[in-house]
Amino acid sequence: MKIGNKIVLLLCLFLSANGIFAKENGTMFSSGNEKLRQRVLANNASFQRESHLLDSVMSKYMESSKSKEELVSDAIQAEWDDSVGSEAFEAYEGNWDTSGVNANRVAVKDVPDSVLISCEGYVPPVKSYTTSRFGMRRYRYHYGIDLKVQIGDEILAAFDGKVRVTRFDRRGYGYYVVIRHSNGLETVYGHLSKIKVSPGQIVNAGDCIGLGGNTGRSTGPHLHFETRYLGNPINPEKLINFQTHEVLADNYLVVKKNSFDWYYNKSTGRPLRIHKVRSGETLSHIAKRYGVTINQICRKNGIRRNSTLRIGQRLRI
């Protein structure tokens, strides 16, 4: 059940017709809500936490200057943090840095060898066609997939979750949003024209989190969409079919040696290094510096031994 929807019954009980609670028969429920109260009691096993939330909200309402709507929002936030979000926070060891996409990145060597990620409840951020795929793009890596949009198109949250970052990156993502999901994934939405959520906000899959745009390092309106686990990019096409706009399976098995093979060095067991070419450097100099062969560098970067290196070019080592 979507975050927030699971306490709809609470909202019905909480927001009475005249906006206040009537004490009748020693309870905080109005007579008009008695049937709803009975439904809560009849489903006590399923709604125990929600009932506790209701009591908490009502108690705070009598003592707080906040509006009912603000208190209900606070309760929903607490519910996510205490239950749904706890699994995600456990994976990230509680790290919740809002300074950028990679702020909570875990080194590949510390990522579990395998972990099962639920893809249930997925909603396409936008139903459009792919304009650029995950992988090497000339001399730099493209960490996500680009989907064609028009400026102003609604961009939707892919899964239920909590917004971690909303920022502007002039030389990269432009206006972008990062959402952490209960399944342990984080999704990134870049080049937006407008952000419609705030850090810490709970969102449901399908909620509008921003509008399509052409901000940052972009040559035309599109959505840059990333899927990351513990901060490390995973090819979104391993999880999602962007032609049918459906997930490939209900669950995706993150296997370190496969999911992160774009920078995971299978022979050494360490992340691949990136070298930025300086003036006067040759493939021979670079290979000697890192203790690898010229052929290895060529294979990893799709170049030839006689290729001309450009100053500033990034090479996977």
Image: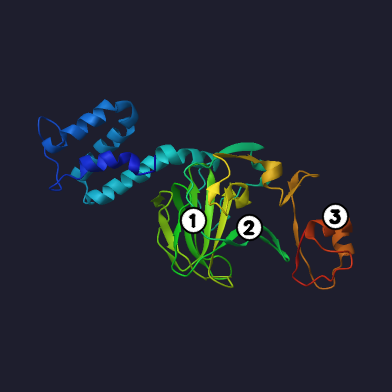
**What x and y, as percent, mark residue 94?**
50, 43
Q: Which of the two marks, 3 or 1, is nearer to us in this view?
A: 1
Residue located beneath label 2 in the image: 143
- At label 1, which amino acid type do we have? Pro
Viewed as shown, does residue 159 lie left or right of 71? right
Of the pair 250 and 105, the residue shown nearer to us: 250
Are the two marked residues, 1 and 2, in contact with CB atoms closer than 8 angstroms? no
Of the pair 151 and 70, the residue shown nearer to us: 151
Question: Measured along the vertical axis of the image, is residue 187 above or below residue 2?
Answer: below
**What x and y, as percent, mark residue 11?**
25, 43
Of the pair 190 and 279, the residue shown nearer to us: 190
Question: Measured along the vertical axis of the image, is residue 180 above or below residue 34?
Answer: below
Q: Which mark is residue 296?
A: 3
Ranked by sequence position, the earlier of labels 1 and 2 is 1
- Callout 1: helix, strand or loop? loop
- At label 2, which amino acid type do we have? Tyr
Quadrant location of the N terminus in the rendered image: top left
Q: Which of the two marks, 1 or 2, is nearer to us in this view?
A: 1
Residue drawn 72% across the image and 52% down it: 263
Viewed as shown, does residue 245 lie left or right of 19? right
Residue drawn 84% across the image and 71% down it: 308
* Distance (Cα) linking label 3 and label 1: 38 Å
**What x and y, as percent, mark residue 167?**
48, 63
Residue located beneath label 1 in the image: 125
Furthest-front residue in this view? 244
* Distance (Cα) linking label 1 and label 2: 17 Å
Ranked by sequence position, the earlier of labels 3 and 1 is 1
Question: Measured along the vertical axis of the image, is residue 215 above or below residue 76?
Answer: below
Ranked by sequence position, the earlier of labels 2 and 3 is 2
Residue 42 in view = yes
Dividing the picture into quarters, in which one does residue 76 lie? top left
Residue drawn 85% across the image and 55% down it: 296
